[in-house]
Amino acid sequence: MENIYRDNLTVSSAPHLVTKLDTQKTMMWVLIALAPALAMGVYVFGINALIMTVVCIVSSVFFEWAYEKLMKKESTIKDLSAVVTGTLIAFNVPATLPIWMAILGCFVAIVLVKQLYGGLGKNFANPAIVARIVLLVSFATQMTTWPLPVAQQTADAVSGATPLAVVGTVKVARGLPKLMDLFIGTIGGSIGEVSAFALLIGFAILLWKKIIVPHTTLAFVSTVFVFAYFYYTKNPIKGVTAAHMGLYHVLAGGVMLGAIFMATDYVTSPIMPLGKIIMGIGCGLFTMIIRFWAGYPEGVSFSILLMNIMTPLIDMLCIKLAYGGGAKKNEE
Protein backbone atom coordinates (compact mmCIF):
# COMPACT_ATOMS: atom_id res chain seq x y z
CA MET A 1 0.00 0.00 0.00
CA GLU A 2 2.84 2.38 0.85
CA ASN A 3 4.38 1.70 -2.56
CA ILE A 4 1.11 2.62 -4.32
CA TYR A 5 0.91 5.97 -2.52
CA ARG A 6 4.56 6.74 -3.08
CA ASP A 7 4.38 5.95 -6.80
CA ASN A 8 1.47 8.36 -7.20
CA LEU A 9 3.37 11.25 -5.57
CA THR A 10 5.17 12.67 -8.58
CA VAL A 11 7.16 15.90 -8.55
CA SER A 12 7.23 17.42 -12.03
CA SER A 13 7.78 20.70 -13.84
CA ALA A 14 5.37 23.62 -14.04
CA PRO A 15 2.95 25.09 -14.85
CA HIS A 16 0.64 23.47 -12.33
CA LEU A 17 0.56 25.90 -9.40
CA VAL A 18 -2.60 25.80 -7.29
CA THR A 19 -3.10 29.53 -6.74
CA LYS A 20 -5.46 32.31 -7.73
CA LEU A 21 -3.14 33.01 -10.66
CA ASP A 22 -3.95 31.03 -13.81
CA THR A 23 -1.67 31.01 -16.85
CA GLN A 24 -3.31 34.07 -18.41
CA LYS A 25 -3.01 36.16 -15.24
CA THR A 26 0.56 35.02 -14.72
CA MET A 27 1.53 36.03 -18.26
CA MET A 28 -0.28 39.34 -17.83
CA TRP A 29 1.88 40.16 -14.80
CA VAL A 30 5.00 39.13 -16.70
CA LEU A 31 4.01 41.58 -19.45
CA ILE A 32 3.45 44.29 -16.85
CA ALA A 33 6.90 43.55 -15.44
CA LEU A 34 8.39 43.82 -18.95
CA ALA A 35 6.71 47.18 -19.60
CA PRO A 36 9.38 49.39 -17.92
CA ALA A 37 12.13 47.79 -20.05
CA LEU A 38 10.02 48.29 -23.18
CA ALA A 39 9.42 51.93 -22.30
CA MET A 40 13.15 52.44 -21.81
CA GLY A 41 13.93 50.65 -25.07
CA VAL A 42 11.59 52.95 -26.97
CA TYR A 43 13.07 55.99 -25.23
CA VAL A 44 16.64 54.95 -26.09
CA PHE A 45 16.17 53.56 -29.61
CA GLY A 46 13.06 55.37 -30.81
CA ILE A 47 9.99 54.13 -32.67
CA ASN A 48 11.89 51.23 -34.25
CA ALA A 49 11.97 49.49 -30.87
CA LEU A 50 8.19 49.71 -30.55
CA ILE A 51 7.64 48.55 -34.13
CA MET A 52 9.95 45.56 -33.59
CA THR A 53 8.12 44.57 -30.41
CA VAL A 54 4.68 44.83 -32.02
CA VAL A 55 5.83 42.80 -35.05
CA CYS A 56 7.25 40.03 -32.83
CA ILE A 57 4.10 39.88 -30.69
CA VAL A 58 1.74 39.77 -33.67
CA SER A 59 3.90 37.18 -35.45
CA SER A 60 4.13 34.94 -32.39
CA VAL A 61 0.38 35.04 -31.76
CA PHE A 62 -0.33 34.39 -35.44
CA PHE A 63 2.00 31.39 -35.64
CA GLU A 64 0.46 29.89 -32.50
CA TRP A 65 -3.08 30.43 -33.83
CA ALA A 66 -2.23 29.13 -37.31
CA TYR A 67 -0.46 25.99 -36.08
CA GLU A 68 -3.27 25.07 -33.71
CA LYS A 69 -5.84 25.78 -36.42
CA LEU A 70 -3.95 23.63 -38.90
CA MET A 71 -3.57 20.78 -36.40
CA LYS A 72 -7.19 21.16 -35.25
CA LYS A 73 -6.15 21.81 -31.68
CA GLU A 74 -7.84 24.10 -29.18
CA SER A 75 -6.56 27.66 -29.50
CA THR A 76 -4.36 28.84 -26.63
CA ILE A 77 -3.60 32.38 -27.77
CA LYS A 78 -5.75 33.80 -24.96
CA ASP A 79 -3.29 32.55 -22.33
CA LEU A 80 -0.89 35.35 -23.47
CA SER A 81 2.13 33.04 -23.46
CA ALA A 82 2.77 33.77 -27.15
CA VAL A 83 2.62 37.50 -26.38
CA VAL A 84 5.31 37.07 -23.70
CA THR A 85 7.46 35.02 -26.08
CA GLY A 86 7.13 37.64 -28.82
CA THR A 87 8.07 40.40 -26.40
CA LEU A 88 11.15 38.53 -25.20
CA ILE A 89 12.26 37.84 -28.77
CA ALA A 90 12.03 41.56 -29.54
CA PHE A 91 13.96 42.34 -26.36
CA ASN A 92 16.81 40.08 -27.53
CA VAL A 93 17.40 41.65 -30.95
CA PRO A 94 18.62 45.03 -32.21
CA ALA A 95 15.89 47.56 -32.98
CA THR A 96 17.22 47.77 -36.54
CA LEU A 97 17.05 44.03 -37.32
CA PRO A 98 15.24 43.41 -40.64
CA ILE A 99 11.61 42.64 -39.94
CA TRP A 100 11.56 39.38 -41.88
CA MET A 101 14.39 38.02 -39.74
CA ALA A 102 12.47 38.82 -36.57
CA ILE A 103 9.41 37.04 -37.99
CA LEU A 104 11.56 33.99 -38.78
CA GLY A 105 12.75 34.01 -35.18
CA CYS A 106 9.13 34.02 -33.98
CA PHE A 107 8.38 31.02 -36.22
CA VAL A 108 11.30 29.10 -34.73
CA ALA A 109 10.20 29.92 -31.17
CA ILE A 110 6.49 29.22 -31.49
CA VAL A 111 6.29 26.39 -34.03
CA LEU A 112 9.60 24.52 -33.77
CA VAL A 113 10.38 24.91 -30.07
CA LYS A 114 6.97 25.29 -28.44
CA GLN A 115 4.18 23.72 -30.51
CA LEU A 116 6.01 20.75 -32.02
CA TYR A 117 6.88 19.62 -28.50
CA GLY A 118 3.26 19.79 -27.38
CA GLY A 119 2.67 23.42 -26.50
CA LEU A 120 3.03 25.38 -23.27
CA GLY A 121 4.53 23.31 -20.47
CA LYS A 122 6.19 20.74 -22.74
CA ASN A 123 8.95 22.67 -24.50
CA PHE A 124 12.48 21.56 -23.61
CA ALA A 125 14.01 25.05 -23.78
CA ASN A 126 12.96 28.68 -23.54
CA PRO A 127 11.53 29.48 -27.01
CA ALA A 128 12.81 33.05 -27.08
CA ILE A 129 16.33 31.91 -26.17
CA VAL A 130 16.40 29.37 -29.02
CA ALA A 131 15.04 31.98 -31.44
CA ARG A 132 17.82 34.42 -30.51
CA ILE A 133 20.52 31.78 -30.92
CA VAL A 134 19.16 30.68 -34.31
CA LEU A 135 19.08 34.30 -35.50
CA LEU A 136 22.57 34.99 -34.14
CA VAL A 137 24.09 31.95 -35.82
CA SER A 138 22.19 32.48 -39.09
CA PHE A 139 22.46 36.28 -39.38
CA ALA A 140 25.52 37.20 -37.36
CA THR A 141 26.12 40.56 -39.04
CA GLN A 142 22.58 41.85 -38.64
CA MET A 143 22.30 40.51 -35.08
CA THR A 144 25.52 42.26 -34.03
CA THR A 145 24.90 45.61 -35.72
CA TRP A 146 23.79 47.60 -32.71
CA PRO A 147 22.00 50.94 -33.10
CA LEU A 148 23.29 53.82 -31.02
CA PRO A 149 20.82 55.53 -28.71
CA VAL A 150 18.80 58.10 -30.66
CA ALA A 151 20.41 60.95 -28.71
CA GLN A 152 23.90 59.82 -29.82
CA GLN A 153 23.15 59.22 -33.50
CA THR A 154 24.64 61.53 -36.11
CA ALA A 155 24.60 61.74 -39.88
CA ASP A 156 27.76 59.63 -39.95
CA ALA A 157 27.08 57.22 -37.08
CA VAL A 158 23.89 55.33 -36.33
CA SER A 159 25.43 52.13 -34.93
CA GLY A 160 28.24 51.32 -32.56
CA ALA A 161 29.86 48.78 -30.25
CA THR A 162 28.10 47.41 -27.19
CA PRO A 163 29.72 47.59 -23.73
CA LEU A 164 30.79 43.94 -23.99
CA ALA A 165 32.45 44.53 -27.34
CA VAL A 166 34.22 47.58 -25.90
CA VAL A 167 35.53 45.82 -22.79
CA GLY A 168 37.38 43.26 -24.88
CA THR A 169 39.48 45.95 -26.56
CA VAL A 170 40.39 48.45 -23.82
CA LYS A 171 43.29 48.44 -21.39
CA VAL A 172 42.44 51.62 -19.46
CA ALA A 173 39.28 52.78 -17.67
CA ARG A 174 38.57 55.84 -19.80
CA GLY A 175 37.59 53.65 -22.73
CA LEU A 176 34.71 52.04 -20.82
CA PRO A 177 31.10 53.25 -20.51
CA LYS A 178 30.18 54.51 -17.06
CA LEU A 179 28.38 52.19 -14.67
CA MET A 180 25.54 54.69 -14.31
CA ASP A 181 25.01 54.69 -18.09
CA LEU A 182 24.82 50.89 -17.98
CA PHE A 183 22.40 50.99 -15.05
CA ILE A 184 20.04 53.56 -16.56
CA GLY A 185 20.38 52.25 -20.12
CA THR A 186 21.71 55.08 -22.30
CA ILE A 187 23.92 52.67 -24.29
CA GLY A 188 23.79 50.45 -27.35
CA GLY A 189 22.47 46.90 -27.28
CA SER A 190 19.33 44.82 -27.67
CA ILE A 191 15.99 46.52 -27.09
CA GLY A 192 15.19 45.02 -23.71
CA GLU A 193 18.59 44.46 -22.15
CA VAL A 194 20.04 47.97 -21.96
CA SER A 195 18.41 49.29 -18.77
CA ALA A 196 19.20 47.36 -15.59
CA PHE A 197 17.07 49.86 -13.66
CA ALA A 198 13.96 49.10 -15.73
CA LEU A 199 14.59 45.35 -15.47
CA LEU A 200 14.93 45.59 -11.68
CA ILE A 201 11.52 47.27 -11.53
CA GLY A 202 10.17 44.27 -13.40
CA PHE A 203 11.99 41.94 -10.99
CA ALA A 204 10.34 43.65 -8.03
CA ILE A 205 6.92 43.23 -9.64
CA LEU A 206 7.47 39.52 -10.27
CA LEU A 207 8.61 38.98 -6.68
CA TRP A 208 5.69 41.02 -5.30
CA LYS A 209 3.15 38.93 -7.22
CA LYS A 210 5.08 35.73 -6.38
CA ILE A 211 5.44 34.89 -10.06
CA ILE A 212 9.06 33.87 -9.46
CA VAL A 213 11.38 33.26 -6.51
CA PRO A 214 14.77 35.00 -6.36
CA HIS A 215 17.02 31.92 -6.14
CA THR A 216 18.03 31.59 -9.80
CA THR A 217 18.32 35.32 -10.44
CA LEU A 218 20.52 36.00 -7.41
CA ALA A 219 22.71 32.94 -8.07
CA PHE A 220 23.14 33.94 -11.73
CA VAL A 221 24.05 37.56 -11.00
CA SER A 222 26.30 36.68 -8.05
CA THR A 223 28.22 34.12 -10.10
CA VAL A 224 28.81 36.63 -12.90
CA PHE A 225 30.07 39.22 -10.38
CA VAL A 226 32.39 36.82 -8.53
CA PHE A 227 33.77 35.31 -11.74
CA ALA A 228 34.53 38.75 -13.20
CA TYR A 229 36.00 39.94 -9.88
CA PHE A 230 38.58 37.15 -9.76
CA TYR A 231 39.32 37.39 -13.48
CA TYR A 232 40.12 41.11 -13.29
CA THR A 233 42.08 40.61 -10.08
CA LYS A 234 44.48 38.59 -12.23
CA ASN A 235 43.99 40.64 -15.43
CA PRO A 236 43.38 44.22 -14.27
CA ILE A 237 42.28 47.15 -16.40
CA LYS A 238 44.20 50.26 -15.43
CA GLY A 239 42.15 52.77 -13.48
CA VAL A 240 39.33 50.50 -12.26
CA THR A 241 38.99 47.92 -9.51
CA ALA A 242 38.05 44.29 -9.93
CA ALA A 243 34.78 45.02 -8.09
CA HIS A 244 33.99 47.74 -10.63
CA MET A 245 34.47 45.26 -13.46
CA GLY A 246 32.31 42.73 -11.65
CA LEU A 247 29.46 45.24 -11.63
CA TYR A 248 30.25 46.12 -15.24
CA HIS A 249 29.68 42.54 -16.37
CA VAL A 250 26.47 42.28 -14.35
CA LEU A 251 25.04 45.46 -15.89
CA ALA A 252 26.36 45.00 -19.44
CA GLY A 253 24.77 42.72 -22.00
CA GLY A 254 21.88 40.41 -21.27
CA VAL A 255 22.66 39.20 -17.73
CA MET A 256 19.84 41.10 -16.03
CA LEU A 257 17.27 40.28 -18.73
CA GLY A 258 18.29 36.62 -18.80
CA ALA A 259 18.53 36.21 -15.02
CA ILE A 260 15.15 37.81 -14.31
CA PHE A 261 12.90 36.84 -17.20
CA MET A 262 14.42 33.87 -19.03
CA ALA A 263 16.38 31.64 -16.67
CA THR A 264 13.36 31.68 -14.30
CA ASP A 265 10.91 30.26 -16.85
CA TYR A 266 8.57 27.80 -15.09
CA VAL A 267 8.77 25.09 -17.74
CA THR A 268 12.48 24.99 -18.46
CA SER A 269 14.00 25.64 -15.02
CA PRO A 270 14.37 23.30 -12.03
CA ILE A 271 11.52 22.95 -9.54
CA MET A 272 13.49 22.54 -6.30
CA PRO A 273 15.13 25.50 -4.49
CA LEU A 274 18.56 23.85 -4.67
CA GLY A 275 18.00 23.15 -8.36
CA LYS A 276 17.19 26.80 -8.98
CA ILE A 277 20.45 27.82 -7.32
CA ILE A 278 22.38 25.28 -9.40
CA MET A 279 20.63 26.66 -12.50
CA GLY A 280 21.73 30.21 -11.68
CA ILE A 281 25.32 29.25 -10.90
CA GLY A 282 25.57 27.21 -14.10
CA CYS A 283 24.19 30.07 -16.18
CA GLY A 284 26.66 32.48 -14.62
CA LEU A 285 29.65 30.20 -15.17
CA PHE A 286 28.83 29.42 -18.80
CA THR A 287 28.09 33.09 -19.49
CA MET A 288 31.50 34.23 -18.26
CA ILE A 289 33.41 31.37 -19.89
CA ILE A 290 31.87 32.33 -23.23
CA ARG A 291 32.47 36.04 -22.68
CA PHE A 292 36.15 35.61 -21.86
CA TRP A 293 37.27 32.67 -23.97
CA ALA A 294 34.76 31.94 -26.75
CA GLY A 295 34.17 33.64 -30.08
CA TYR A 296 31.10 35.56 -28.91
CA PRO A 297 31.19 38.67 -26.71
CA GLU A 298 27.94 37.57 -25.03
CA GLY A 299 27.12 34.19 -23.54
CA VAL A 300 23.80 34.59 -21.72
CA SER A 301 21.59 32.93 -24.35
CA PHE A 302 23.93 29.98 -24.82
CA SER A 303 24.30 29.50 -21.07
CA ILE A 304 20.54 29.46 -20.45
CA LEU A 305 20.00 26.98 -23.28
CA LEU A 306 22.70 24.69 -21.91
CA MET A 307 21.14 24.79 -18.44
CA ASN A 308 17.65 24.25 -19.92
CA ILE A 309 18.96 21.02 -21.42
CA MET A 310 20.43 20.02 -18.05
CA THR A 311 17.27 20.86 -16.09
CA PRO A 312 15.83 17.29 -16.05
CA LEU A 313 19.13 15.98 -14.65
CA ILE A 314 19.24 18.74 -12.04
CA ASP A 315 15.65 17.92 -11.05
CA MET A 316 16.46 14.23 -10.73
CA LEU A 317 19.46 14.96 -8.52
CA CYS A 318 17.67 17.43 -6.25
CA ILE A 319 14.52 15.33 -5.89
CA LYS A 320 16.66 12.30 -5.01
CA LEU A 321 18.58 14.32 -2.43
CA ALA A 322 15.35 15.65 -0.93
CA TYR A 323 13.16 12.54 -1.00
CA GLY A 324 15.21 9.52 -1.97
CA GLY A 325 16.62 8.72 1.49
CA GLY A 326 13.25 8.91 3.20
CA ALA A 327 11.66 6.47 0.76
CA LYS A 328 14.45 3.95 1.29
CA LYS A 329 14.08 4.13 5.08
CA ASN A 330 10.33 3.56 4.84
CA GLU A 331 10.87 0.42 2.78
CA GLU A 332 13.29 -0.90 5.40
Image: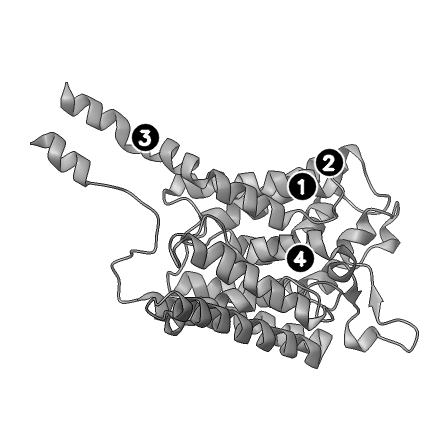
- Residue drawn at point x = 62 percent, y = 64 percent: 104
Left or right, 129 with respect to 165, comes to: left
Give the structural element (helix, strand or loop) at label 1: helix
Horizontal and vertical percent position of residue 243: 70, 44
- Residue drawn at point x = 64 percent, y = 67 percent: 102
Task: Tell me the tag on residue 203.
Answer: none
Structural distance between the alpha carbons of marks 2 and 1: 10 Å
Horizontal and vertical percent position of residue 71: 38, 65
Query: Mark 1 and mark 2 in contact (Cβ < 8 Å)?
Result: yes
Give the structural element (helix, strand or loop) at label 2: helix
* Amino acid carrying mark 1 in the image: Met
Left or right, 258 with respect to 167, comes to: left
**Who comes first in sequence, dot 4 or dot 2?**
4
Residue where numbered disc 2 is placed? 231
Q: Residues within 10 Å of mark 1 (few under 14, many from 20)?
A: many
Please identify the quarter of the rendering in which residue 4 is found: top left
Horizontal and vertical percent position of residue 135: 66, 57
Q: Nearer the viewer, mark 4 or mark 2?
A: 4
Give the structural element (helix, strand or loop) at label 4: helix
**Who comes first in sequence, dot 2 or dot 3?**
2
* Amino acid carrying mark 3 in the image: Lys
Task: Tell me the tag on residue 288.
Answer: 1
Q: Residue furthest bottom?
A: 47
**Who comes first in sequence, dot 1 or dot 4?**
4
Task: Tell me the tag on residue 320.
Answer: 3
Q: Residue furthest right?
A: 156
Residue where numbered disc 4 is placed? 135
Q: Nearer the viewer, mark 2 or mark 3?
A: 3
Structural distance between the alpha carbons of marks 3 and 1: 30 Å
Residue 133 lies, with reference to residue 279, above or below; the image says below
